[in-house]
Image (tube, rainbow, N blue to C red):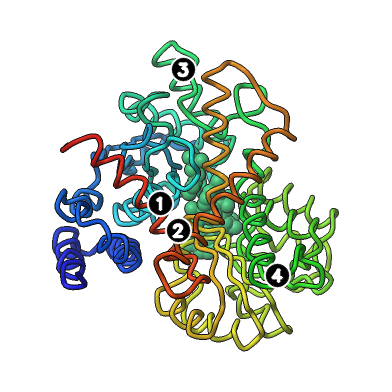
Amino acid sequence: MEEYLEQLMEKVVEKNPGEKEFHQAVREVLESIEPVIKKNPRYQKEKILERIVEPERVIMFRVTWEDDNGEIHVNRGYRVEFNGAIGPYKGGLRFHPTVNLSILKFLGFEQIFKNALTGIPMGGAKGGSDFDPHGKSESEIRRFCESFMMELFRHIGPNTDVPAGDIGVGTREIGYLFGTYRKLVNRWEGVLTGKGINWGGSHIRPEATGYGATYYLIEMLKKFHNKKDLNGLKVAISGSGNVAQFASKKVTELGGKVVTLSDSKGTMYLPDGLNDEIWNAVYEIKALRRGRLKEVADKFDLDFYENKKAWEIASKEGDVDIAFPCATQNEIELRDAKMLLDAGVTLVVEGANMPTTPDAIEHFMENDVIIGPAKAANAGGVAVSGLEMSQNAQFTYWSPEEVDRKLHSIMVNIFNTCVTYAEKYTDDSKNLIAGANMGGFVKVADAMIEQGIY
Ligand code: NDP
Ligand code: 2IT
């Protein structure tokens, strides 16, 4: 068995040379699911793993746009439609200079299992561009979005593929993308999620990833620490974008003390935690003005550490109970894990996708730190995207309370699925990573078998 999985991994590396983030994401899933592969020989016989690691379709295209000075720029656009067995392809768009095929294949691959865990019928996909939104004018952002959609529109549709936001893509970009799509096809339809609340967006979608991950964290505390809130706990959060904003808000609401926020320029330390005034300034500067977190630190006379990660600052400044990465992939490396462990961390909840490197995960697990894995913990965002699709399909809308209630119950279900699989197939009920991977995999694998060979 192990040999079969190892050989498969070798083939994935050989067939996708240099795509190290994609290899990392596949390796984690293959290492986790051995018990269910052993138990169900049909998965091997029907070549489900060989199929599932191969995207159903990869679209790559040129995006040409003109800046405010009349200069022409060329970027690369992508959409990786990874697996559509259980529903329309679904997943975000990322605009960031580091975007390449490896990054989008890792994100699209993980999205398959995450979406399956939500219980809503959605396949896995991811897309985006190496376009850098930092420092661009409003008109430049709009022209880029228009040009991007001029190609993407022919590949997507409300029952085919439904993109959303991710790093560098929020309500503003979804607006320009949606406007262009509607102009091109002459139909108003729920082809994108994360839309504005006045034009078909869902209540609680902006909040959903951060809130959902915090609900998942509460389930971890209840099950493993016999605690039902965050009272008295110090939480180190990285990032200050969409996920970090609403994770920090919910953590504070539930009694936790948020000790750090960060952006790509450095970390802000919050000795007294977050309050409404500071949160509003973070939202104003990061979400509305797209400025730097340092402006918030300066405004409130807080320390800002240039080019330092949240983990180092939180660990140096005192004890930390929970690490809550909400920025980007591989942001907790082995040295960070060691610092966090020394500072007293016992739980990690992954708001970002694949934020913890494999050696950091190993170090945490060897030292009994429990990890709430991204594809379970941050599934609240895509879950509410699924609810947005339902509302659009029915031409209706649900109240904030109703969406929040549904989000909460989805997150509790996801946590329970992780625990059930971990308990049934491993000797460690705290191995939520294995639980999430198995829980998501079985659902998609069974659907693929039932649908025949394609
Ligand atoms: P945003 O663009 O809103 O915010 C990203 C934040 O992370 C910013 O503070 C940004 O800093 C920082 N950041 C991004 N890339 C880097 C980098 N390479 N190094 C250091 N800092 C970086 O994105 P989101 O909040 O939407 O996404 C954050 C994470 O959550 C990503 O991993 C995303 O895939 C994941 N996620 C998002 C979901 C959603 O619904 N939005 C759903 C599930 C997961 P700066 O402002 O300086 O650029
Ligand atoms: O990584 C993710 O789950 C997202 N960026 C959200 C995807 C979505 O379709 O809402």
Give amino acid for label 3.
Arg
Q: Secondary structure at mark 3?
A: helix
| Label 2 environment density (alpha carbons within 10 Å; few <14, some 14–19, many ≥20) | many
User: Looking at the image, do the residues carrying marks 2 and 1 touch, with CB atoms under 8 Å apart?
Assistant: yes
Marks 2/1: CA–CA distance: 6 Å
- Residue carrying label 4: 235
Instruction: Tell me: is circle 1 under 8 Å from ligand 2.
Output: no
Disc marking residue 440 = 1
| SS class, disc 2 | helix
**Residue under the image location 83 percent in, 64 percent down:** 300
Q: Residue furthest top?
A: 186
In the rendered structure, find residue 182 and report the number of the disc placed on it: 3
Name the quarter showing ligand 1: bottom right
Mark 1 vs mark 4, CA separation in Å: 28 Å
- CA distance for labels 3 and 2: 37 Å
Q: Position of residue 11 (x, y in %)?
A: 14, 63
The circle drawn on residue 436 is 2
Hey, what amino acid is under mark 1? Gly
Give the percent coordinates (x, y) of residue 130: 38, 49
